[in-house]
Amino acid sequence: METFYIILIIIIGLLFGVFPMARFLHTSLYPYLKSVFMQEDVLSTGISVNALITHASQTTSYDGNLPIYRLTLSFKTVEQQQTEATIMKPLSFSEIERFAAGNYTIIKYDPTNPHHIAITDKPLILGD
């Protein structure tokens, strides 16, 4: 009987502890961290362009006290190729309106892979 309870506790621990944690890591934390590191690289080597925010939705994750939003942006590359890319970004209450669907923002994109983007929050300057 004692073995049955030990096995039952292990099964309950897996169902309510390990599996949800693995799901969270796979669906929320890993994509966000991957996006953050990719954005750092793009900010240092990317090309600046204007982009239209086509979709903005809040995820269930937070970075500090800021909700993380999934932003889909549409832009033209220097080669005039229309591209759409999605990034995850924590937004403060004042930034939510600024990054709503239909607004424009300035981004940098990786010329070798235009789907890698980062929001710069700086005005677009000629030659940048």
Image: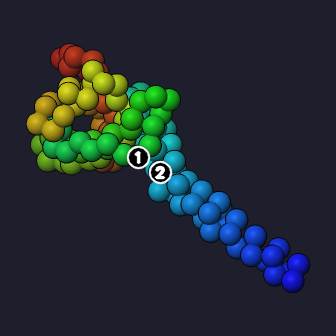
In this rendering, does residue 61 appear at all? yes
- Tell me the amino acid under the disc marked 2: Ser
Location of mark 2 (residue): 28
The residue positioned 51% from the left and 48% from the top of the image is 29
Q: Are marks 1 and 2 in contact (CB under 8 Å)?
A: yes
Query: For residue 95, what is the image quadrant?
Result: top left
In this rendering, does residue 75 appear at all? no
Colour mode of the rendering: rainbow
Looking at the picture, tell me which residue is in the foreground, 102 or 14: 14
Figure quadrant of the C terminus: top left
Q: In the rendered image of this protein, does residue 2 appear above or below residue 106?
A: below
The spot of residue 122 in percent (x, y) is 27, 18
Q: Residue furthest right?
A: 2
Mark 1 crowdedness (10 Å alpha carbons): few <14, some 14-19, many ≥20: few
Q: Is residue 35 left or right of residue 11?
A: left
Location of mark 1 (residue): 60
- Tell me the amino acid under the disc marked 1: Thr
